[in-house]
Image: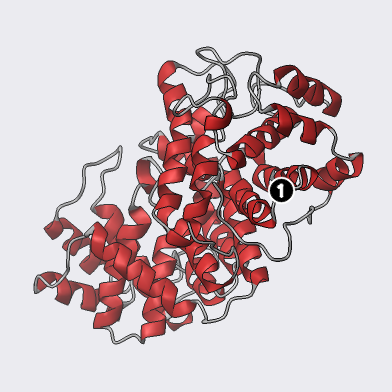
Amino acid sequence: MSSIRSTGRAFYAGLFEALLSVMGSSNGYLADHGPRTAYLARQMARAMGCSDREIAEIVLAGILGDVGMIGLAEDAWEVPTPVLDARTRGLVRAHPIRSEATLASIPHMEDVADLVRNHHEWWNGAGYPDGLAGPQIPRGARILRLADTVAALGEERPQRPPRDSDTVRAIVADASGREFSPDVAEVWMDLHDSGSISEFQSGIYKKWSWQAAEALIPDAVSPISSEHLLEILASIIDAKDAYTAGHSRRVASFSVAVAGQMELSEEIRGTLWAAGYLHDLGKLSVPVRVLAKPGRLSDDEMTLVRGHANRGAEVLEGIQPLRHLTTGARYHHERWNGSGYPEGLSGEQIPLVPRVLAVADAYDAMTSGRAYRRPRVHQHAIDELIDQSGKDFAPEVVKAFVTLQENVFESVRNDSTPPGPPRSRPAPSSTSPLSRKGHGRGSRPD
C-alpha cells in the first residue's frame, strides 16, 4: 500500500466524509433524518436560485443540524415515546446551540454553523433558540425549517404513522406565514404539485453531500485544521457515552507514547495517532441505553456493542484517505490468546496498530469511570495489564506501556494538549479494556 500522509486536504476531506457518514447511523427518530432533510433542502435551494456556495452550506447544515443531539437526551430518540417529558423537551430545544458550537469549531464550517443555529426559527418568531422572525432568519435556515418538517412528517413516529403526501401538503399550506416563510412554502408546494421533487436516493445523496463538502473545503488545508477536525470528530464519538469524555484523545496519546517507547516508525506513529481518535467510530450506531447500562449486558446487547468494531471499520474502509485506519478500528478488541472479537485473531495475526491500541484502550477504560463501576487507580490498571500480558495483550506492547515515564500519564490525564504525533504524520501500516475480569457472556467490552 502506498503511503498516505495524515495531513492536508485529502485527510481533512476524509475526516469530514466520516462525519457525514456517521450522521445517518443513529437509531429511532434520527435515523437518516439529516440526510433526507438535506436531500429535500438542496432541491428547494436550487429552485429558489441559491448560489452554489449557499446550496453547499444548506446541504451540510441539513445533514449536520442534529449533531448536537448526539449524547443529548439521545435515549428518547432511540427508544421513542409518544410524548416527551418537560426535561427532554428542554434539552431538545437546546440542540441547535450545541450543534452550532460543534460546527463553529470545525475549520471552514463557520457559515454552516450559523444556518444550523437558526434552522428551528419560525417565520412568526415562535421558534427557537433566539425567537428570530421574518427576514431576520437567513434564507438557508428558512429552507431548512421547511425541509426538516416535511422530512419528519414523512417518517414514522411512535404517536403516528408517516403522513401521506396530501396531508403533508395541507400542513405546509396551513403553516405558511406562521412556521414557514411564505416564499419558501410556495416553492415547495409548486415542486410538490408539479411532481418535481425527487424521492431520496442514497447514491445521489452521497454525491450531493460530497459535492457540498468539496465546495467548502479550500484547496490548501493546514495540518492544524485536520488535527482540529480530528479532535471534534472524536469528541462527537465520546459524547455518545457520558463516561467516555476524552477517551479517544487519551487512547491516541498513549498509543503514540508507546510507539515512541517501542521505537516504531513515524509512519506507524502517525497511523496510531489518527486511529486512536477514530477507533470507536462505530459506537455512534450503538444505542445509549446499551452503552450506559449499569448492569450486565444481555446477549443481544453484547452483539450490538461488539458490532461497533466492524461498523467503524466499514465507514473508514469506504473513505480512501482514511482506509489505513481500518485495521485499528476493526481489531482493537482482538486478544493475544484469541478470545477477542470480531474475528478471534491471536498472537501476531493481530496487526501491530490494534495491538497497541488495545493496551491503551484497556488502561484508559480501567482508569475512567463507567456506569457500572468506579475508576481504578493507576497502579491497579498497570498490575492488570501485566497480569494479562501474553493472555489478552501483546507482551511487547504491555512492556512498553508499563515502562512509560510518570510524566506521560500526568500529561495525558491533565493536559488538553497531550503528547502529539510526529510532526510529519504519514499513515498507513499494516479488545476493549478490562472493565471486569474475564470475557465471558455478559462481561462489558467497553
Q: Looking at numbered disc 1 in the image, what kind of residue is underneath it?
A: Leu
Rendering quarter of residue 147: bottom left
Q: Secondary structure at mark 1?
A: loop
Label 1 neighbourhood size at 10 Å, few (<14), some (14-19), many (20+)? few
Residue at x 45%, y 51% (from the top left corner): 316
Give the camera-side residue of 121 and 332: 332
Looking at the image, is 160 positioned above or below residue 315?
A: above
Side of 343 where 267 appears, left or right: right
What x and y, as percent, mark residue 221?
A: 58, 76
432 vs 282: above or below: above
The quarter of the displayed image where residue 239 is located: top right
Q: Specify whether residue 146 is in view.
A: no
The residue lying toward the viewer, choosing from 109 and 393, is 393
- Vertical placement of 431 versus 275: above or below? above
User: Can residue 356 be seen in the rendering of this structure?
Assistant: yes
**Figure colour scheme:** secondary structure
Could you tell me which residue is drawn at 14 percent across and 69 percent down? 192
Viewer-side residue, 418 vs 299: 418
Residue lying at the far left in this picture: please name it: 194
Residue carrying label 1: 264
> Quick check: 162 left or right of 126?
left
Image position of 21 (left or right of 183): right
Residue 83 is situated, as x and y percent measured from the top left of the image, at: 39, 38
Which residue is more in the foreground, 244 or 138? 244
Question: Residue 326 placed where, x, y %?
Answer: 49, 47
Q: Number of marks in the image? A: 1
x, y percentage for residue 372? 64, 21
Residue drawn at x 66%, y 22% is 435
Question: Residue sitting at 46 percent across and 44 percent down?
Answer: 312
Relative to 31, does residue 2 appear above or below in the rendering?
below
